[in-house]
């Protein structure tokens, strides 16, 4: 299974996007892109309802900071339950269906039977939270080499 995956990014829930970003910039990260995703549900998942900013080193953007826009949504809920910290880890895969089948064969459950499309057009699967407790794990198959589920 390890040959199917590469770490794509780590999503960190924060209470103050500006302050958290400034801290990353102090240690050499560059703010590359930013945006927001509204509260509207999409493909059966609740809307993110958060602002985000992607930070990079070299060619990669390994960190995405996420700040809730209001009291509704998974980022706000995460912060209420756990405080600031790693909210998700995303792995890029070349073939999301093959990766899903390989995980299922290993006894790992996926949150859904079929992958869904995120706002950037990536195909995505979430691993069921019970199988990797404490962090949401996503698999992403990008239509190109620069996957970004937050665009």
Image: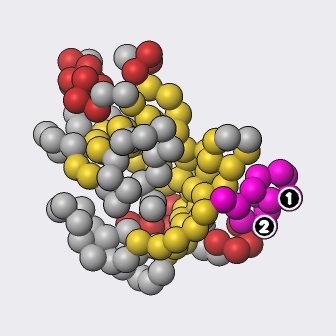
Report if residue 87 is visible in the image. Answer: yes
Residue at image position (76%, 52%) is 29
Are the residues at dot 1 and dot 2 in contact (C-beta closer than 8 Å)? yes
Q: Which mark is residue 26?
A: 1
Query: Percent from the top left, x then y, of residue 115?
Result: 21, 43
Q: Quadrant of residue 129?
A: top left
Which quarter of the figure is the N terminus placed in? top left
SS category of the residue bearing label 2: helix
Residue 130: within the magenta?
Answer: no
Q: Residue furthest front?
A: 144
In depth, the one of 95 and 77 nearer the eye is 95
> Residue lying farthest left?
113
From which residue to which does the magenta span run? 21-32
The picture places residue 135, in percent across and down from the top left corner, at 45, 46
Q: Residue at x 28, y 32 (%)?
A: 96
Q: Is residue 115 left or right of 147 when viewed as pictured?
A: left
State the separation of the CA atoms marked 1 and 2. Answer: 6 Å
> As displayed, is residue 51 above or below residue 94?
below
Residue positioned 66% across, 59% down in the render: 32
The residue that label 2 is drawn on is 22
On the rendered image, what quadrant is the C terminus found in? bottom left
Q: Provide residue 136's location: percent of width, then percent of height.
A: 40, 47
Q: Nearer the viewer, residue 100 or 144?
A: 144
């Amino acid at each position: 299974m390890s040959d199917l995956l590469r770490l794509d990014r780590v999503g960190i829930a924060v209470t103050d996007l500006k302050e958290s970003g400034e801290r990353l910039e102090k240690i050499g990260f560059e703010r590359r892109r930013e945006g927001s995703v509204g509260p509207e549900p999409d493909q059966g998942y609740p809307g993110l309802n958060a602002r985000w900013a992607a930070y990079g080193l070299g060619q990669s953007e390994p960190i995405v900071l996420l700040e809730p826009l209001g009291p509704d949504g998974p980022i706000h809920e995460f912060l209420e339950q756990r405080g600031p910290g790693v909210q998700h880890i995303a792995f890029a895969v070349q073939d999301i269906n093959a990766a899903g089948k390989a995980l299922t064969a290993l006894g790992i459950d996926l949150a859904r039977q079929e992958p869904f499309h995120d706002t950037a057009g990536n195909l995505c699967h979430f691993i069921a939270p019970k199988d990797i407790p404490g962090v949401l794990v996503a698999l992403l198959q990008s239509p190109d080499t620069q996957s970004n589920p937050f665009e």
